[in-house]
């Protein structure tokens, strides 16, 4: 059976697998890693997979449809996201005009809104719920054999007007049995198409564990997709894949461990680090962590080639942290930062504003805390109440959610809009504060001096220049867009064929 795994086109260059699926002002673009994991499983089966990332390749609707026709698949797997679901379903409608292939949607959004999605979009034949590596293989096997789809766990589909939800597929416990995702990248993708603003380019993303036991109310991955049951690959399996990448994808300069939290099992972290050193692998890697690590584990990571720590500080106000069940004290975050900076580990600090209980005063607390921690790079983002999360249910119950129309979740620049109006703190105020905090942080002479001093190496200067170019291009395009509208109806900033852009805007995007 021919299976097309597709990241369909969008008017914005968004990372649907990112925790914040939007067009970033830093030029970051994630791999379609869940589609890629499903592809790697199919590569070891009797089926013929093809993985296409239309967003990474800047393909529009018509060009992507041509590729669909050329491959002539029996089934098409599409990963969607909350702000892109309408566009993705629209693309599936166009597919139905040229193909008899079954359309299967997957991802966090459709897992959280399964029945709503099937009722809203007739172009979607089926939904693969949760982690879907082996679900897709099961569907392909049943369709190929003409058997009963009700035998496939973890799917939902229509049957004579009813929606059938088969039992949830048990979570894969032995993650070592899943083929390396890097093999699918090597076969079907170009590592140069993907970028993380603070990482060396090209970089590569993989998961060394799944699930997170922490209970942060805003994070949809463990609440909807990977769940709260922590499962991990063995240290040997992780380092084996790192070594495979080192030997077979020599252009990759940095490996990013995309786990919800890489450092949950600290003993395994020490094992991974020791094994990297024992094999004498000269690797550069980075990972997501919590701000509760001590000096010893950070030193082991640094000695084994760790370069960047992506950490969710979230807020500089302890009450707000308690409201979102972060489980971190500000003093812990301060100690963690001190240890990491002593070891010259780079920090990408993520902060959120507009969280439950936030006020203008607590937002300023967050900014001052960010200045005190002084990460190499910061991200001030509004809290987004994704479906399936406690944050979403809270905002909906309180009547604070501005819209449940997912087609309105992007603003005109392709960024997630500020969707929560709390008493005394409107979404519009959060939006203005978000932009203001970013400029206050990055234009601070102290930060500019610190950045230049920390990035004297020619490669690092190039990376910083690339990030700065993308950021200021974003600001300029936003200003151009605002001036162009000036009372007119707003239209998307970037279209498939850029029909509203002039040469100047086009050059800014190059």
Image: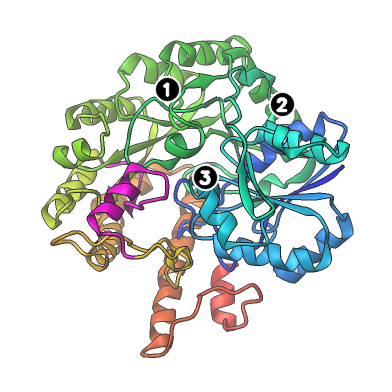
Q: Would you name the residue on which mark 1 appears?
A: 263
Q: Would you name the residue on which mark 3 appears?
A: 108
- Residue at (61% x, 62% y) in the render: 121
Q: Position of residue 423 (x, y in %)?
A: 15, 60
Q: Does 438 sit above or below residue 262?
A: below
Q: Mark 1 or mark 2, which is nearer to you?
A: 2
Q: Earlier in the sequence, mark 1 or mark 2?
A: 2
Q: Does 93 sit above or below residue 318?
A: below
Q: Would you name the residue on which mark 2 appears?
A: 179
Query: Which quarter of the figure is the C terminus placed in?
Result: bottom right
Location of residue 252 (image quadrant): top right
- Residue at (76% x, 64% y) in the render: 96
Q: Mark 3 or mark 1, which is nearer to you?
A: 3
Location of residue 47 (image quadrant): top right
Badge 1 marks a residue whose secondary structure is loop
Badge 2 marks a residue whose secondary structure is loop
Q: Position of residue 292 (x, y in %)?
A: 29, 24
Q: Position of residue 242 (x, y in %)?
A: 64, 25
As for residue 247 lying within the magenta part, the answer is no
Q: Does 160 sit above or below residue 286?
A: below
As for residue 382 lying within the magenta part, the answer is yes
Q: Which residues are magenta?
A: 374-402
For the question of whether residue 204 can be seen, the reply is: yes
Q: Position of residue 434 (x, y in %)?
A: 28, 60
Q: Can you name the residue that lies furthest to the bottom here?
A: 487
Q: Earlier in the sequence, mark 3 or mark 1?
A: 3
Q: Of 480 and 340, which appears nearest the observer?
A: 480
Q: How is the image coloured?
A: rainbow
- Residue at (69% x, 31% y) in the render: 134
Q: Which mark is residue 315?
A: none
Q: Mark 3 or mark 2, which is nearer to you?
A: 3
Whole-number angstrom distance, CA of label 3 to CA of label 2: 22 Å
């Amino acid at each position: 059976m021919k299976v097309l795994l597709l990241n369909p086109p969008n008017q914005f260059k968004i990372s649907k697998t990112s925790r914040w699926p939007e067009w970033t002002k830093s030029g970051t673009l994630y791999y379609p890693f869940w589609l890629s994991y499903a592809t790697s499983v199919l590569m070891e089966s009797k089926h013929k997979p093809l993985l296409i990332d239309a967003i990474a390749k800047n393909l529009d609707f018509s060009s992507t449809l041509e590729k669909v026709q050329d491959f002539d698949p029996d089934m098409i797997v599409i990963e969607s996201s909350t702000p892109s679901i309408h566009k993705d379903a629209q693309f599936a409608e166009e597919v139905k005009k040229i193909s008899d292939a079954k359309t299967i949607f997957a991802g966090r959004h459709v897992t959280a809104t399964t029945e709503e999605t099937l009722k809203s979009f007739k172009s979607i034949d089926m939904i693969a719920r949760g982690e879907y590596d082996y679900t897709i293989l099961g569907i392909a096997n049943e369709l190929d054999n003409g058997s009963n789809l009700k035998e496939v766990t973890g799917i939902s589909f229509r049957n004579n007007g009813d929606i059938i939800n088969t039992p949830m597929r048990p979570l894969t416990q032995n993650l070592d049995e899943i083929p390396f995702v890097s093999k699918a990248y090597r076969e079907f993708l170009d590592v140069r198409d993907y970028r993380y603003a603070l990482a060396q380019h090209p970089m590569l993303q993989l998961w060394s564990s799944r699930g997170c036991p922490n209970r942060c109310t805003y994070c949809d991955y463990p609440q909807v997709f990977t769940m709260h049951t922590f499962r991990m690959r063995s240290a040997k399996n992780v380092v084996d894949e790192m070594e495979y990448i080192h030997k077979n994808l020599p252009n990759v300069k940095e490996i990013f461990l995309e786990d919800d939290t890489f450092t949950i099992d600290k003993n395994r972290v020490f094992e991974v680090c020791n094994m990297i050193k024992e094999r004498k692998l000269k690797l550069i890697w980075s990972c997501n962590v919590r701000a509760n690590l001590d000096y010893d584990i950070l030193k082991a990571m640094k000695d084994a080639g760790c370069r960047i720590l992506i950490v969710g500080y979230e807020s500089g106000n302890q009450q707000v942290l308690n409201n979102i069940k972060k489980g971190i004290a500000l003093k812990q975050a301060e100690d963690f930062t001190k240890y990491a900076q002593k070891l010259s580990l780079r920090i990408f600090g993520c902060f959120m504003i507009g969280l439950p209980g936030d006020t203008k005063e607590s937002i300023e607390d967050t900014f001052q805390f960010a200045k005190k921690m002084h990460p190499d790079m910061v991200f001030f983002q509004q809290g987004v109440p994704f479906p399936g999360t406690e944050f979403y249910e809270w905002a909906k119950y309180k009547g604070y959610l501005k819209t449940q129309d997912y087609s309105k979740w992007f603003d005109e620049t392709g960024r997630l809009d500020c969707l929560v109006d709390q008493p005394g703190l409107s979404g519009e105020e959060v939006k203005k504060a978000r932009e203001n905090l970013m400029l206050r942080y990055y234009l601070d002479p102290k930060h500019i001096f610190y950045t230049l001093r920390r990035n004297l190496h020619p490669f690092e200067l190039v990376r910083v220049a690339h990030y700065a170019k993308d950021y200021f291009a974003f600001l300029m395009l936003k200003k151009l867009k605002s001036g162009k509208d000036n009372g007119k109806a707003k239209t998307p900033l970037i279209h498939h064929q850029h029909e509203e852009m002039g040469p100047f805007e086009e050059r800014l995007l190059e």
